[in-house]
Image: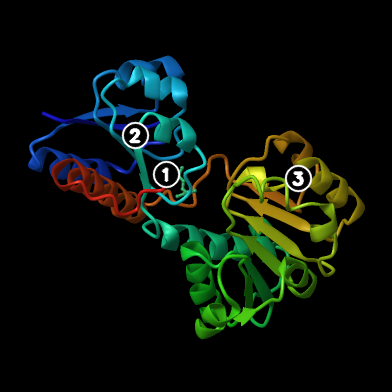
C-alpha cells in the first residue's frame, strides 16, 4: 500500500487535512501527518517509508530525498517550488509537481487588504488616503497577478502589469495596461505589487535603482518571496526616501533593521498570503488528487522537473 505524508511546518486548516486524508485513504493508500515540526530530523524520520509527500514551503533537499528511500513524488500544495531541489529530484527520478492557481485568490485578497491597511496608516485613526484612481503596477501576470488585477479593478484602481514571460496582448486582453518593461512599471505606478517567483534571474532583482525610481509616496508590496528583494539596498533607500513604504507578508532576513522605519514598514509575523481554509483546501485536495493520479495512472500534469 502506497504511503503519503503530509509534511507541513505551517499546517493546513483542519478541513483541508480531513479532505486530503479522505482522498488518499479513499484511493486505498495510507496517509501520515507531520505538522508544526521544528527540527529537520523529524522530517527525515517521517519520510523514511513514504512514496509521496505533500508540502507547503517545507524544504525538500537532497538529504530529505536520500532519507526517503521509496519516494516517487513530491507535490508542493501551492505555486512556488523554490523550496524543492529540482535537480536532486530529477537525479533520483522523483517527480515534483505544484498546484498552480489553487491559492491565488487568497494571496490576491491579502494584497488588497494590506493596501487598505497601509493607505489608512495601519489603522491608527489618522486621516489616510484611498485606492480609487491610484495606479497599481503588477510585476508578473501569473495566477496571483491576474487575481490582484481583478480585485484592484473593483477598487477603481488603474492597473498595469509587466511579465517577462507573458506577451503584452495577453495582459491587455485581461483589461490591464501592459508596461513596456519593469522599469516603466516602477516609474509610472503609485503602488507596485510583486508576484515574481524566486529564480536565479529574479533573486535580489528588486533593488535601489528600481524602487528608487518610484513616485513620491509610493508603496512596494511583496507577497512573493523575500529572496527577490535586495534587502541592504532597500534599507538604504528607505533611509534616504522617507516618503516610501515597504509592505510584505514574508518577514525579511533584516526585519529588525526594517522595523526602524516606523509607519513605513509592515510585515505579517508569518507568511500568510495562502493561509485561508479555502486556499488550503483547494491546494491540498489538488495535491492529493495529483498524487493519486500519478501513482494509479502515471499522470504527470503539473510536473515541474521535466
Ligand atoms: C505559494 O507559493 O503557493 C505561496 O507562497 C504560499 O506558500 P505557503 O503554502 O507556504 O503558505
Nearest to viewer (mark 1 / mark 3): 1
Residue at the (12%, 34%) spot, across then down? 29
| CA–CA distance in space, label 1 to label 2 | 9 Å
Q: Secondary structure at mark 2?
A: loop
Q: Secondary structure at mark 3?
A: loop
Quarter of the figure with the N terminus = top left
**Towards the viewer: 182 or 276:** 182
Is disc 2 surrounded by few (<14), some (14 to 19) or many (20+) residues within 10 Å? many
- Residue 94 - label: 2
Residue under label 3:
230
Circle count:
3
- In this view of the protein, can residue 124 be seen by the observer? no
Residue under label 1:
305
Vertical position of residue 130 compared to residue 100: above or below: below
Residue at the (64%, 79%) spot, across then down? 178
Vertical position of residue 42 compared to residue 72: above or below: above
Q: Position of residue 238 (x, y in %)?
A: 84, 51
| CA–CA distance in space, label 3 to label 2 | 33 Å
Is disc 1 surrounded by few (<14), some (14 to 19) or many (20+) residues within 10 Å? some
Disc 1 to disc 3: CB gap under 8 Å: no
Disc 1 to disc 2: CB gap under 8 Å: yes
Q: Position of residue 246 (x, y in %)?
A: 72, 54
Q: Position of residue 76 (x, y in %)?
A: 38, 43
Nearest to viewer (mark 3 / mark 2): 2
**Towards the viewer: 70 or 251:** 70
Residue at the (44%, 60%) spot, across then down? 104
Sequence order check, earlier mark of 1 and 2: 2
Amino acid at each position: 500500500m502506497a504511503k503519503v505524508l503530509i509534511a507541513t511546518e505551517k499546517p493546513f486548516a483542519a478541513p483541508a487535512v480531513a479532505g486530503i486524508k479522505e482522498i488518499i485513504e479513499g484511493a486505498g493508500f495510507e496517509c501520515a501527518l507531520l505538522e508544526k515540526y521544528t527540527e529537520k530530523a523529524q522530517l527525515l524520520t517521517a519520510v523514511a517509508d513514504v512514496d509521496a509527500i505533500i508540502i507547503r514551503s517545507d524544504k525538500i533537499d537532497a538529504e530529505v530525498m536520500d532519507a526517503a528511500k521509496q519516494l516517487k513524488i513530491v507535490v508542493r500544495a501551492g505555486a512556488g517550488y523554490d523550496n524543492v531541489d529540482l535537480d536532486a529530484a530529477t537525479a533520483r527520478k522523483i517527480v515534483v509537481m505544484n498546484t498552480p492557481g489553487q491559492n491565488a485568490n487568497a494571496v490576491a485578497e491579502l494584497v488588497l487588504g494590506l493596501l487598505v491597511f497601509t493607505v489608512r496608516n495601519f489603522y491608527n485613526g489618522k486621516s489616510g488616503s484611498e485606492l480609487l484612481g491610484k495606479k497599481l503596477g503588477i510585476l508578473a501576470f501569473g495566477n496571483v497577478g491576474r487575481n490582484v488585477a481583478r480585485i484592484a479593478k473593483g477598487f477603481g484602481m488603474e492597473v498595469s502589469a509587466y511579465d517577462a514571460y507573458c506577451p503584452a496582448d495577453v495582459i491587455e486582453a485581461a483589461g490591464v495596461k501592459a508596461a513596456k518593461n519593469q522599469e516603466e512599471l516602477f516609474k509610472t505606478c503609485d503602488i507596485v505589487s510583486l508576484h515574481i517567483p524566486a529564480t536565479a534571474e529574479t533573486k535580489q532583482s528588486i533593488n535601489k535603482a528600481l524602487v528608487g525610481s518610484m513616485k513620491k509616496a509610493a508603496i512596494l508590496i511583496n507577497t512573493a518571496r523575500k529572496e527577490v528583494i535586495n534587502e541592504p539596498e532597500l534599507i538604504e533607500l528607505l533611509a534616504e526616501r522617507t516618503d516610501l513604504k515597504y509592505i510584505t507578508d514574508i518577514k525579511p532576513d533584516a526585519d529588525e533593521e526594517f522595523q526602524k522605519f516606523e509607519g513605513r514598514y509592515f510585515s505579517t509575523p508569518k507568511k500568510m498570503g495562502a493561509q485561508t481554509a479555502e486556499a488550503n483546501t483547494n491546494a491540498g485536495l489538488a495535491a492529493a488528487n495529483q498524487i493519486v493520479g500519478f501513482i494509479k495512472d502515471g499522470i504527470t500534469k503539473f510536473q515541474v522537473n521535466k
